[in-house]
């Protein structure tokens, strides 16, 4: 799974694409540059306020804290929603492993909020075929992983009367495949090489995969769900490294007479060892997994979470903590709902009056509760429930 | 009360075992819950009011009104012959509906010109959006007969989501004449007293200048758009009709369940939301409201303090903390109940066609 964008690496530029994310010279990802390079818009406070107004509830923590910070045509979706025109949500996951960590849950937590706040349906794609091709796993193993991951996704609290989960191996065919062929006809080999960096050595499975991820953005791919609603828009919450797929989709859509999907994109979830570290499945201490016990969480945070505090207590009281690189504070900004409390920690910790240990303790409490809640919800998910979520069935009240 | 709270706490906060609360059990649990949290309004069984109940209610509220009985009248002209001596302005009342099956009562002085086209535009329904409602709707929704439309009809439960527009001109009159749910009688009361009555029934009186014709266009939004009802009137229809007419069997079980859930929830809330589906948020809000109300009253009993003296912040804290937890549990539960219904539906179809598949969708 080597990505042939090595020439960019040599230049020392940051690399962001669906298969690789790395910062320039081992530093932090420059999001402003990324937005500029990709051509999307920033989400500002007025947009967040507007969302609050339209949904009559407080905005989700990820919107308030700027985790979801970029968008394409989200304003248009809001305008249409205000005029009574609904939309549907589309997100997905590549089920490469059974172990999900908190970073994997971020887009799903946000999507659940969007589903509840706007009362719209959702399709979730499990790209088991992609993982089969890229990670060289067997078809059976990928299908199994897809079902296991589906359980964790369901545990995030999606509404079964509004959600359709599907795995590529099970669902592709019919109208979905017809759209795939239509999209494939519009994208040349040169184009995919340019967007995704494929080479002559890559197998043809990889090269023909992109339409699979593009097509769920078109409502005609799901005739059992959306055959009655004309001109339904699609909103895709995803991490910003998935942007290339949807740039391609947005380019193709008008040529097929479809609406362009809108996007709302999130930044990357930092690894425990800090922004420069990489979250990898082989290193269990690089992330908090949803299967971790409270003891594991406490251990991991205390031992491995990269601290922005100074090396000695005197220095810390003098200079305060470096909040830019401090992982416990960063994690709290993701998961601590109380704005006032976070602000308090920011001032006290930044000034050096609060110690790293206290911040870590607070984080351990927050994360333990989160993981415990997820674990309980996961335990309530049965095989039958997964079957029901994945069944091709109509959703009569999906907009109520 | 304490045992119920405990039962409730155990059911909710404890380990949520879906198999213990199979959907029949779930219905039972909901009914038990509702039994103990007694609704606190004294509405009649079906929420339908008679003329005598209305007059009694007016007297209770100490509203002065003059009345006079007469043979049944169907038009304003006929009514005018009998009620001249009462003084005040006779009202003409129109029962209208729009294309999306939402209903409106327009109550205006007989002398006021009411242009339906203009009103339709002001409501944001376009030029021809308002029509006279069919006769059946009069009976079904307002529970009155022909010639008897009156603002008082909005007190009926079935008319909760009917929007009421009152003529501004009423305010200038000493008395306004309306039918008190029967066209064999007319009562005259002051518009302020009418307001008092409507407010007591949980309705906000809205007065509109019927003859005004403001421009409605791209830059001028319809000024009466806020009067569009948010729900569709709940008409008594047996659930069996809906269920038997469904083609998709998998839908059948889930719809039965969700209708039953929704109807069970709707038995006691004061505000009637025509939410046709099992909505987690409204369910949890209601749960928390009832729990905090009873907790507050229990604490008040124990400490002999007035309920109002107790810190509201405690309740807010509980709401915030429990709200998220309850929502998750409720969603988990809803999904489990749907799943069971779904699979039963599949099995039932398969049994009918003579097959027998144990697992589906692998």
Image (spheres, coloured by chain):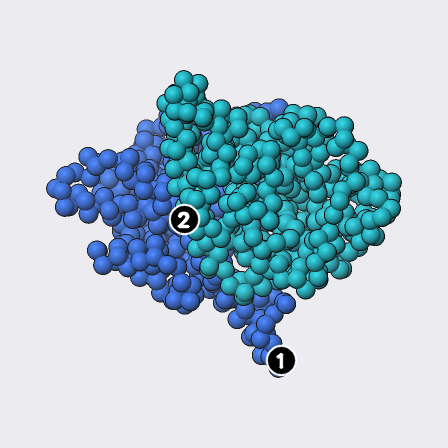
Chain colours: A cyan, B blue
Name of the residue lying farthest toward the top: A318
Task: Give the left or right position of residue B319, taking residue B102 as reference.
Answer: left
Quick one: SS at disc 1? loop
Q: Is residue A126 above or below residue A320?
A: below
Q: Residue A91: x, y in percent?
A: 63, 46
Name of the residue lying farthest toward the front: A312
Query: Which label belongs to residue B355?
Result: 1
Task: Give the left or right position of residue B325, taking residue B249 as reference.
Answer: left
Q: Chain of mark 1?
A: B
Task: Give the left or right position of residue A23, taking residue B18 as reference.
Answer: right
Q: CA distance from mark 1 to mark 2?
A: 50 Å
Q: Is residue A316 above or below residue B177?
A: above
Q: Are marks 1 and 2 on the same chain?
A: no
* Residue B23 in sight from this viewpoint: yes
Query: Which label belongs to residue A295?
Result: 2
Task: Give the left or right position of residue B267, taking residue A242 as reference.
Answer: left
Name of the residue lying farthest toward the left: B304
Q: Residue at x 54, y 48 (%)?
A: A284
Q: Residue A42: x, y in percent?
A: 63, 27
Quadrant housing residue A256? top right
Mark in front: 1 vs 2: 2
Quadrant housing residue B60? top left
Query: Which label belongs to residue B273?
Result: none
Q: Residue at x 50, y 50 (%)?
A: A290
Q: Residue at x 39, y 59 (%)?
A: B16
Q: Residue B215: x, y in percent?
A: 60, 25
Q: Nearer the viewer, residue B87 or A93?
A: A93
Q: Residue at x 87, y 43 (%)?
A: A188
């Amino acid at each position: 799974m080597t990505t042939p964008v090595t020439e960019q690496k040599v230049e020392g530029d940051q690399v962001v694409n669906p298969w690789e994310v790395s910062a320039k010279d081992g530093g932090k990802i420059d999001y402003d540059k990324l937005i500029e390079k990709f051509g999307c818009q920033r989400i500002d406070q007025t947009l967040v306020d507007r969302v609050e107004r339209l949904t009559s509830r407080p905005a989700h923590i990820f919107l308030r804290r700027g985790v979801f910070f970029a968008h394409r045509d989200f304003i248009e979706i809001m305008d249409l929603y205000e005029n009574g025109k609904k939309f549907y949500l589309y997100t997905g996951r590549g089920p490469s492993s059974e172990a999900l960590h908190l970073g994997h849950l971020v887009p799903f937590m946000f999507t659940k909020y969007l589903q509840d706040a706007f009362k719209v349906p959702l399709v979730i794609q499990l790209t088991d075929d992609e993982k089969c091709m890229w990670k060289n796993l067997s078809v059976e193993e990928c299908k199994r992983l897809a079902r296991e991951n589906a359980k964790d996704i369901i545990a995030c609290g999606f509404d079964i009367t509004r959600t359709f989960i599907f795995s590529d191996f099970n669902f592709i065919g019919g109208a979905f495949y017809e759209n795939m062929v239509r999209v494939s006809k519009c994208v040349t080999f040169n184009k995919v090489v340019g967007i995704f960096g494929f080479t002559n050595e890559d197998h043809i499975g990889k090269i023909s995969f992109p339409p699979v991820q593009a097509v769920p953005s078109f409502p005609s791919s799901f005739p059992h769900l959306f055959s009655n609603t004309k001109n339904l828009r699609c909103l895709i919450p995803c991490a910003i490294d998935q942007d290339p797929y949807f740039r391609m989709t947005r380019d193709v859509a008008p040529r097929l007479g479809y609406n362009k999907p809108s996007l709302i994109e999130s930044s990357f979830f930092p690894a425990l060892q800090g922004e420069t570290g990489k979250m990898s499945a082989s290193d269990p201490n690089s992330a908090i997994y949803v299967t971790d016990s409270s003891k594991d969480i406490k251990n991991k945070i205390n031992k491995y979470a990269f601290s922005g505090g100074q090396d000695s207590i005197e220095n810390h009281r003098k200079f305060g903590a470096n909040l830019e690189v401090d992982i416990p504070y960063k994690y709290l900004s993701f998961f601590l709902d109380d704005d006032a409390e976070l602000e308090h920690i920011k001032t006290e910790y930044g000034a050096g009056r609060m110690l790293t240990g206290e911040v870590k303790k607070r984080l351990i409490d927050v994360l333990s509760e989160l993981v415990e809640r997820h674990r309980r919800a996961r335990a309530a998910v049965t095989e039958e429930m997964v079957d029901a979520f994945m069944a091709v069935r109509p959703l009569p009240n999906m907009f109520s | 009360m304490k045992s119920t709270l405990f039962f409730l706490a155990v059911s909710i906060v404890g380990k949520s075992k879906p198999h213990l609360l199979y959907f029949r059990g779930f219905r039972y649990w909901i009914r038990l819950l509702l039994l103990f949290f007694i609704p606190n309004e004294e509405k009649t069984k079906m929420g339908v009011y008679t003329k005598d109940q209305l007059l009694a209610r007016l007297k209770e509220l100490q509203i002065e009104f003059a009345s006079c009985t007469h043979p049944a009248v169907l038009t304003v002209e006929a009514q005018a012959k009998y009620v001249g001596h009462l003084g005040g302005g006779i009202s003409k009342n129109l029962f209208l509906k729009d294309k999306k099956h939402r209903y409106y009562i327009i109550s205006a002085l007989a002398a006021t010109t009411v242009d339906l086209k203009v009103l339709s535009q002001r409501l944001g329904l376009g030029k021809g959006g308002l029509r006279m409602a069919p006769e059946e709707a009069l009976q079904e929704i307002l529970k009155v007969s022909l010639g008897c439309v009156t603002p008082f009809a909005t007190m009926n439960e079935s008319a909760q989501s009917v929007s009421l527009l009152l003529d501004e001109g009423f305010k200038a009159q000493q008395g306004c004449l309306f039918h008190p749910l029967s066209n064999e009688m007319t009562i005259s009361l002051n518009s302020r007293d009418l307001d008092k009555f409507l407010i007591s029934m949980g309705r906000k009186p809205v007065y509109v200048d019927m003859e005004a014709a403001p421009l409605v266009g791209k830059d001028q939004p319809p000024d009466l758009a806020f009067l569009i009802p948010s729900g569709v009137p709940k008409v008594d229809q047996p659930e069996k009709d809906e269920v038997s007419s469904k083609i998709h069997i998998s839908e059948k079980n889930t719809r039965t369940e969700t209708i039953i859930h929704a109807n069970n929830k709707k038995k006691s809330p004061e505000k009637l939301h025509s939410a046709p589906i099992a909505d987690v948020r409204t369910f949890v809000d209601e749960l928390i409201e009832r729990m905090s109300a009873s907790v507050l009253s229990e604490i008040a009993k124990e400490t002999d303090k007035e309920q109002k003296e107790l810190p509201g912040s405690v309740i807010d804290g509980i709401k915030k903390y429990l709200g998220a937890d309850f929502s998750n549990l409720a969603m988990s539960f809803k999904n489990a109940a749907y799943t069971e219904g779904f699979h039963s539906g599949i099995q039932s179809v398969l049994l009918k066609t003579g097959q027998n598949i144990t697992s589906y969708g692998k």
